[in-house]
Image (spheres, rainbow, N blue to C red):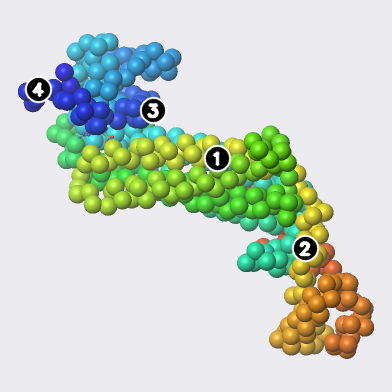
């Protein structure tokens, strides 16, 4: 019989059992469920709601069950619907009637809210560690490339020369924000819903603060209706993972471009690329493509749960059982993506020469040529026009600004002098950009110091 079978005259249909049950996916909450129950019963005993001896028996029974689940000795039962009732039923089987006191002053509604919050906190901790590994790898690569010149792009057209570290550290900043969003998510999750009951708390004299402390929550949910029906923290998590995946996806897109024969800025390690079953020459960036592709399902999970929540009246509704697969899928996806992405970038070869060649070929120094004229006294708009004409000349003659003779320069404007060549060399263009946040070696070294301090502080 079902744990709630008393009011029913007949058994549920197997279709109902199958449709209603969540054990196939919420089984992974077993540990949180058991730890939550242990805290709950020890509080019940402290408050003299159940005898201390009973609480001891229940706690021991739960710990034994936890060990056996972790040893793989337990099979859960779909007829028992979810992880909460499976564990309770198993405990009754094992230690008898005393286990029936465990659910005093509690509902599955506040129980599931508790389990999911505890689970999300654990996962956020894991994600923070994985993200820090990636950020550490980025800093290590950046240290090697503080004077590796590459083209910076706008509209995917070569724009101005930058350093490879400058490009990589842009991602460092994105990941730093992702890290803050993970912390925010943790804070939003870190409130105890237990004690909210089904919706309206209970008449037993529960000590919610005691349970909060035992389970390391820094507050208790202030309103019981909100306590059982709030899934904002799940949405915060799904949003945080979505933005993080968006960053990984943009990075992936660049790696895919950079490893194409047209760019050849990087070469992926054989261990992190794949071949084609028909074209013998192929070496494909499948990992980067899959990370980019999986971003779609992660966005889908966010939209899905937002949509599930949008019409729900207070308080608990069974619709909310749909939260779990969405957050599990996003967590599993990002936990697969982060480590492999980290290894992929750690092992890729950087083709400095090709980056330099690309920066040299595409008039990325045209702005600096205009700035040269400004320093000699021209107004910027006039300088822009002069250099525009020179670029047009170079395009027709299939040459570059650095290859033009001084005669050609002076024919367009007499103010040009020998020092133009130094002024438009790529090294000058990059290293004169010493402004905070810029690409020069000097600015990058300063940024790297901050990045290292961030990592040291966050570990
Ligand atoms: N399996 C349920 C869920 O995930 C647990 C709460 C069930 N509560 C209820 N009143 N049916 O939401």
Would you name the residue on which mark 1 appears?
A: 337
The residue indicated by pointer 4 is 10
Q: Which quadrant would residue 395 be assigned to in this image?
A: bottom right
Provide residue 400's location: percent of width, then percent of height.
Answer: 83, 71
Foreground of the two, 268 or 39: 268
Q: Is residue 168 left or right of residue 125?
A: right
Kindly identify the residue that appears in the image at 70 percent across and 57 percent down: 166
Q: CA distance from mark 2 to mark 3?
A: 51 Å
Of the numbered discs 3 and 1, the one sitting upstream in the chain is 3
Alpha carbons under labels 2 and 1: distance apart: 31 Å
Q: Identify the residue shown where x is 37% and y is 37%.
A: 325
The structure residue drawn at horizontal position 73% and vertical position 55%, both measured from the top left corner, is 262
**Of the pair 111 and 258, the residue shown nearer to us:** 258
Q: Which mark is residue 176?
A: none
Taking depth in this image into account, of 117 and 360 the one nearest to the observer is 360
Of the numbered discs in the image, which one, if any, rests on residue 28? Answer: 3
Q: Give residue 327's quadrant in the image.
A: top left
Q: Are marks 4 and 1 in contact (CB under 8 Å)?
A: no
User: What residue did someone put label 2 on?
Assistant: 359
Q: Give yes or no for contact between labels 3 and 4 (Cβ–Cβ under 8 Å).
A: no
Circle 1 SS class: helix
Q: Is residue 363 above or below residue 269?
A: below
Tell which circle, 2 or 1, labels the residue nearer the N-terminal end: 1
**Quarter occupied by the C terminus:** top right
Can you see residue 207? no
Report helix, strand or loop for mark 4.
loop
Which residue shows up at 22% across the image and 49% down it? 312
């Amino acid at each position: 019989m079902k744990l709630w079978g008393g009011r029913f005259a007949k058994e549920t249909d197997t279709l109902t059992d199958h449709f209603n049950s969540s054990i196939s996916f919420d089984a992974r909450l077993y540990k949180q469920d058991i730890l939550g129950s242990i805290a709950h019963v020890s509080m019940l005993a402290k408050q003299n709601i159940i005898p201390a001896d009973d609480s001891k028996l229940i706690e021991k029974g739960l710990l034994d069950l936890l060990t056996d689940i972790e040893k793989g000795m337990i099979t859960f039962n779909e007829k028992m619907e979810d992880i909460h009732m499976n564990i309770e039923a198993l405990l009754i089987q094992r230690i008898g009637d005393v286990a029936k006191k465990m659910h005093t002053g509690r509902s599955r509604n506040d129980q599931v809210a508790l389990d999911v919050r505890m689970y999300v906190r654990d996962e956020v901790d894991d994600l923070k560690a994985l993200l820090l590994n990636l950020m550490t790898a980025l800093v290590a690569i950046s240290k090697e490339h503080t004077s590796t010149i590459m083209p910076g792009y706008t509209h995917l057209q070569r724009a101005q020369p930058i350093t490879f570290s400058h490009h990589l550290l842009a991602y460092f900043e994105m990941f730093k924000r992702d890290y803050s969003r993970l912390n925010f998510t943790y804070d939003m999750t870190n409130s105890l819903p237990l004690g909210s009951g089904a919706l309206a708390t209970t008449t037993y004299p529960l000590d919610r603060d005691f349970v909060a402390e035992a389970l390391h929550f820094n507050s208790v949910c202030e309103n019981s209706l909100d306590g059982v029906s709030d899934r904002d923290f799940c949405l915060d998590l799904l949003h945080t993972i979505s933005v993080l995946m968006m960053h990984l996806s943009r990075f992936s897109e660049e790696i895919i471009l950079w490893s194409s024969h047209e760019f050849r800025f990087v070469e992926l390690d054989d261990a992190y690329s794949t071949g084609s079953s028909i074209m013998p020459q192929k070496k494909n960036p499948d990992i980067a493509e899959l990370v980019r592709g999986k971003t779609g399902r992660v966005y889908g999970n966010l939209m899905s749960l937002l949509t599930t929540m949008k019409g729900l009246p207070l308080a608990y509704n069974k619709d909310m059982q749909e939260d779990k697969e969405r957050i599990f899928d996003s967590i599993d996806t990002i936990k697969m993506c982060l480590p492999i992405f980290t290894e992929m970038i750690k092992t890729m070869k950087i083709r400095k020469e090709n980056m330099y060649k690309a920066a040299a070929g595409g008039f990325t120094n045209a702005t600096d040529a205009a700035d040269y004229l400004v320093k000699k006294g021209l107004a910027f708009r006039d300088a822009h026009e002069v250099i525009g004409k020179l670029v047009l000349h170079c395009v027709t003659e299939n040459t570059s600004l650095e290859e033009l003779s001084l005669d050609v320069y002076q024919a367009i404007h007499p103010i040009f002098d020998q020092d133009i060549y130094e002024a438009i060399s790529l090294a000058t263009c990059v290293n004169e950009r010493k402004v905070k946040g810029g690409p020069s070696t000097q600015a990058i070294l300063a940024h790297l110091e901050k990045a290292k301090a961030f990592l040291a502080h966050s570990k």
